[in-house]
């Protein structure tokens, strides 16, 4: 029997609209055309035989072969996208350095990771609800801003972060609180990517001010129900965070 | 975060279920269908997701189903940022993710923990 249409939250629908528009627009280091090509490669990676081989191997370094890319992006970009999409729990700092050594800048790396996170979130939401994947948007013309925050430092993570105390006005708004956790700081080397990502993520999960309010839920499921799903998805990805 | 949210409700949860699967006794309404949807979404298993979706829609209505799907999808983003940027896991969940809890949950057997 065919399912009837599922009523979606308006803020989710609007957030997805804004997110796809952001992906199509010129970014900080990538043009709109390249950002949409990243989105296409993200979807393509999930059918890559080499990625399936890596995932099945006891060690991700044991699998031999080449990614089946779409032929638009560089080999470093394809490696980054395919591994982050298909086997994120077995990445390492050595691997991230090897990707950068193949000619990708730190800013490009972080911007691509932000797009991966957004597209994966929206596509898996569609899958969960039995909705079709949204066609990729038409890229918007324009030049990337090439803005690198002056406070970006490599210290706690594999890539540089902008700690809340190092953020400057030119970065634009980034953190809801000076105590924002590392997950919030992850994309901070590219502030626009951080903003785009979190504008979407908070509508899926929770706005920052509700994250540690365990006693109540602003969603239609209880907090333990939310955290049960979150924990199981994270564990299946072997995410230690 | 799961343990914390349960404790606030005066309940307990075996956190080992996070990695090894939860048994029928977990004291969260519709836990089986919620986990089923989460696992189906990770596996990109559309038929399995459809079955879980039908069960959750009947149990929780559209709003509950949508929020369950939204959370499952959200963590496909969070994990990728954490793992690709290599953010430190110490202090995760606002410091609630203590080493003993990681051991109990089976997280210390994950690739990144073994390699450090």
Image (tube, coloured by chain):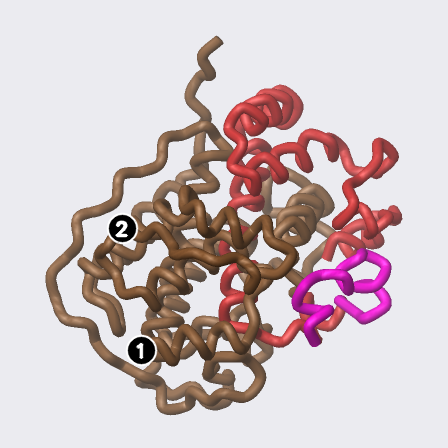
Chain colours: A brown, B red
**Residue located 66% across and 72% down the image:** B89
Q: Is residue A178 above or below residue A129?
A: below
Mark 1 or mark 2, which has the lower sequence index?
2
Q: Please state the extent of the stretch shown in magenta in the rendering.
A: B97-116
Whether residue B114 is in magenta: the answer is: yes
Marks 1,2: beta carbons within 8 A: no
Residue at (54, 32) in percent of width and height: B45
Chief secondary structure of the magenta span? helix
* Spatial CA span between label 1 and label 2: 19 Å
Q: Does residue B38 appear in this view? A: yes
State which chain disc 2 sits on: A
Q: Which residue is mark 2?
A: A70
On-image quarter of the C terminus of chain B: bottom right
Quadrant of the drawing holding the N terminus of chain B: bottom right
The residue located at (71%, 69%) in the rendering is B113
Query: Most extreme residue toward the left, as rendered?
Result: A141
In the picture of the structure, the residue carrying the numbered disc 1 is: A103
Q: For the residues tagged 1 and 2, is the chain the same?
A: yes
Disc sitting over residue A55 in the figure? none
Circle 1 Cα neighbour tier, 10 Å, few/some/many (<14 / 14–19 / ≥20): few
The quadrant where residue A104 appears: bottom left
**Chain where mark 1 sits:** A
Q: Residue A75's quadrant in the figure?
A: bottom left
Whole-percent x, y for residue B80 in the image = 51, 60
A131 or A55: nearer the viewer: A55
């Amino acid at each position: 029997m065919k399912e009837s249409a599922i009523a979606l939250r308006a803020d989710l629908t609007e957030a997805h609209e804004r997110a796809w528009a952001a992906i199509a627009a010129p970014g900080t280091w990538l043009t709109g055309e390249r950002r949409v090509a990243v989105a296409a490669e993200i979807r393509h990676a999930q059918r890559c035989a080499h990625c399936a081989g890596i995932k099945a191997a006891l060690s991700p370094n044991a699998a031999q072969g080449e990614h089946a890319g779409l032929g638009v992006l560089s080999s470093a970009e394809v490696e980054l996208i395919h591994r982050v999409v298909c086997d994120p729990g077995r990445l390492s700092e050595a691997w991230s350095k090897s990707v950068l050594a193949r000619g990708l800048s730190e800013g490009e790396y972080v911007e691509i990771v932000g797009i991966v996170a957004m597209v994966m979130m929206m596509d898996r939401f569609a899958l969960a609800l039995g909705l079709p994947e949204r066609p990729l948007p038409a890229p918007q013309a324009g030049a990337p801003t090439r803005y690198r925050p002056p406070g970006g430092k490599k210290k706690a993570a594999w890539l540089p972060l902008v700690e809340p105390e190092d953020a400057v006005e030119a970065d634009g708004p980034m953190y809801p609180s000076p105590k924002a956790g590392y997950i919030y700081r992850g994309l901070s080397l590219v502030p626009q990517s951080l903003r785009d990502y979190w504008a979407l993520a908070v509508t899926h999960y929770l706005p920052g001010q509700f994250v540690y309010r365990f006693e109540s839920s602003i969603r239609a499921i209880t907090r333990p129900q939310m955290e049960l799903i979150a924990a199981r998805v994270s564990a299946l990805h072997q995410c230690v965070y | 975060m799961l343990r914390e949210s349960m404790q606030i409700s005066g309940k307990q949860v075996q956190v080992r279920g996070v990695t090894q699967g939860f048994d029928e006794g977990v004291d969260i309404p519709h836990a089986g269908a919620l986990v089923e949807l989460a696992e189906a979404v990770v596996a990109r298993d559309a038929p399995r997701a459809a079955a879980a979706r039908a069960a959750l829609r009947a149990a929780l209505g559209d709003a509950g189903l949508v929020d369950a799907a939204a959370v499952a999808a959200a963590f496909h983003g969070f994990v990728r940022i954490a793992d690709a940027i290599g953010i430190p896991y110490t202090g995760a969940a606002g410091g609630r993710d203590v080493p003993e809890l990681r051991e109990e949950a089976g997280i210390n057997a994950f690739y990144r923990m073994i390699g450090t």
